[in-house]
Image (cartoon, rainbow, N blue to C red):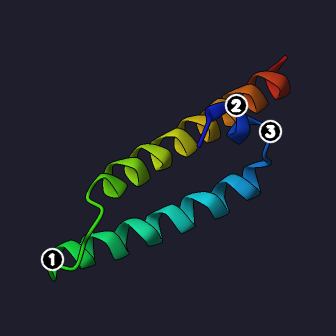
Amino acid sequence: MDANELREKTPDQLRDELASLKKESFNLRFQQATSQLENTARMRKVRRDAARVKTVLREKAAAAAVTEAG
């Protein structure tokens, strides 16, 4: 997932994306705990994608705050 793709989405779409990434992260952790996880690199990718989504959400919130103040 590219940050530029995320910047094109609305905040609601980003929140939905973050929720699905958190759900996937939970499922991956559960698979790892039960020794069923095959692709361990997927956990890292999901974690970093969630961080990207959070970063873009904060950027949009900051931009909105500047727009309202100015």
Please tell me which residue is depicted at 15% across the width and 76% down the height of the picture.
33
Q: To which residue does mark 2 refer?
A: 4
Q: To which residue does mark 1 refer?
A: 33
Determine which of the numbered discs, if any, sits on residue 19 in the image.
none
Q: Residues within 10 Å of mark 1 (few under 14, many from 20)?
A: few
Classify 67 as above or below 36. Answer: above
In 3D space, how far apart are the residues under numbered discs 3 and 2 (Cα atoms)?
Answer: 7 Å
Q: Where in the figure is residue 16, as x and y percent of width and height?
A: 66, 64
The residue lying toward the viewer, choosing from 65 and 52, is 52
Within the image, what quadrant is residue 15 found in?
bottom right
In 3D space, how far apart are the residues under numbered discs 3 and 1 (Cα atoms)?
Answer: 36 Å
Q: To which residue does mark 3 refer?
A: 8
Q: Residues within 10 Å of mark 3 (few under 14, many from 20)?
A: few
Classify 10 as above or below 13. Answer: above
Please tell me which residue is depicted at 46% across the width and 42% down the height of the picture.
51
The residue lying toward the viewer, choosing from 57 and 2, is 2
Say which element carries label 1.
helix
Give the residue type that dot 3 points to: Glu
Q: Are marks 3 and 2 in contact (CB under 8 Å)?
A: yes
Q: Is residue 53 left or right of residue 60?
A: left
